[in-house]
Amino acid sequence: MEGIIKIIDKKAKETDFYGIISINKNNKNIFNNAYGYRNINNEIYNNLETKFGIASGTKLFTALGIGTLIEKNHITLDTEIEDILTEPILFIDKKATIKNLLTHTSGIYDYYDEEIITDYDNYFVEIPWFKLETPTDYLPLFRNKKMKFKPNERVSYSNGGYVLLGIIIEKISNKLYRDYIKDYVLKPAGMNDSGFYAFNDLPKNTALGYKMYNDHYVTNIYNIPIRGGGDGGLYATNSDLIKFWKNFFSYKIIPRKIFESFITPHVDIWNGVKYGLGLYITEINNKKVYFLVGSDTGVGFHSKYIPEEDLIINILSNKTDGQREIVNTFKNILEFK
């Protein structure tokens, strides 16, 4: 492992990596380094307890919010959209299920369709980003839009589907999405230093997200919603993510019966990688690997857990796709996908 650590540290310095790289095995941090600035203009460095955006890594937390509603018998995986949304809708088939949304097979219209959008550093929607504070705020982006396809026709990674899951959480719980996830997912996971923070009210020791613009770095405050929602935007610390994996796999968030459906592969998402409910699943050397990824303007995130080795690898970056070079280095030396 010492050789791997040297390779990773060298790559981080060569590529001007900003963020944290952590390797935790058997509850011990065998590599845990912070790099670069959390505030460039004021020359404030990232440290080991800095909070970072995790972009689409948030989807598992949304899925777990749904899991707690299943535990409370409010819904099931087979509950159909028409049983929850009573108003006329075009953007999704009314027979699509909760499971369809969780597994990207619903065919819902996607406001942020990654099959079409490739340049998220320059992507905008009809509503100003600063007005998108909670999933229900996104509803105008869906009205009068047509579904992409019928449920179960294919897999299509869907940000819109997870926004709708956030809306469903709000509708059933009568609470703001961020409050519900805090109370029923983050707290049971032991994630006391993580949350959905607004750009204009960030807590101390939170990394600003950066993108390249005209040969220098600028922040991402005009490129993504002011506060995260169902499809992305949670801020987390490295230590909280380590707690999360352990508590998730110890049934502290959802009971074992529901947990098993989360880590069961349901669809093929890309070559050699399957998708459970909100998380990716693959194998390395015949060992199951569960992982989360997130990329957005000013955010790069990757987190893996290998239960058989009790090994957690976290890469959190506050640059657009800042995790990519480090992930590729791990892949080359550990056969990671």
Image (cartoon, rainbow, N blue to C red):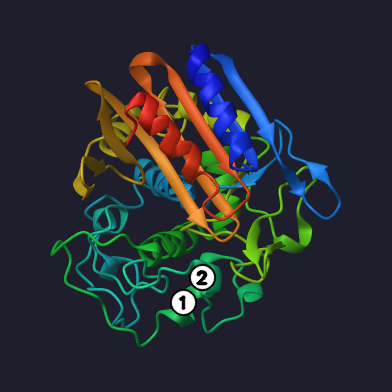
Residue 180: where, in percent of width, then height? 55, 50
Q: Secondary structure at mark 1?
A: helix
Q: Residue at x 58, y 20 (%)?
A: 31
Residue 168, quarter of the rendered image: bottom left
Q: Secondary structure at mark 2?
A: helix
Q: Residue at x 48, y 28 (%)?
A: 313
In the depicted view, which residue is nearer to us: 42 or 249? 42
From mark 1 to mark 2, how far is it between C-alphas?
6 Å
Q: Amino acid at mark 1?
A: Leu
Image height of 259 relative to 194, above or below = above
Q: Is residue 116 left or right of residue 214?
A: left
Q: Residue at x 66, y 35 (%)?
A: 192
Image height of 43 relative to 223, above or below = above
Residue 64: where, in percent of width, then height? 42, 43
In the depicted view, which residue is nearer to us: 312 or 97? 312
Identify residue for label 2. Answer: 136
Q: Is residue 313 left or right of residue 187?
A: left
In the depicted view, which residue is nearer to us: 197 or 120? 120
Image height of 61 relative to 8, above or below = below
Badge 2 crowding class, 10 Å Cα cut-off, few under 14, some 14 to 19, many 20 or more, is many
Q: Is residue 237 visible?
A: no
In the depicted view, which residue is nearer to us: 256 or 40? 40
Res 256 label: none
Badge 1 crowding class, 10 Å Cα cut-off, few under 14, some 14 to 19, many 20 or more, is few
Return the residue found at the far left: 153
Residue 271, quarter of the rendered image: top left
Residue 50: where, in percent of width, then height? 71, 38
Q: Amino acid at mark 2?
A: Thr
Identify residue for label 1. Answer: 139
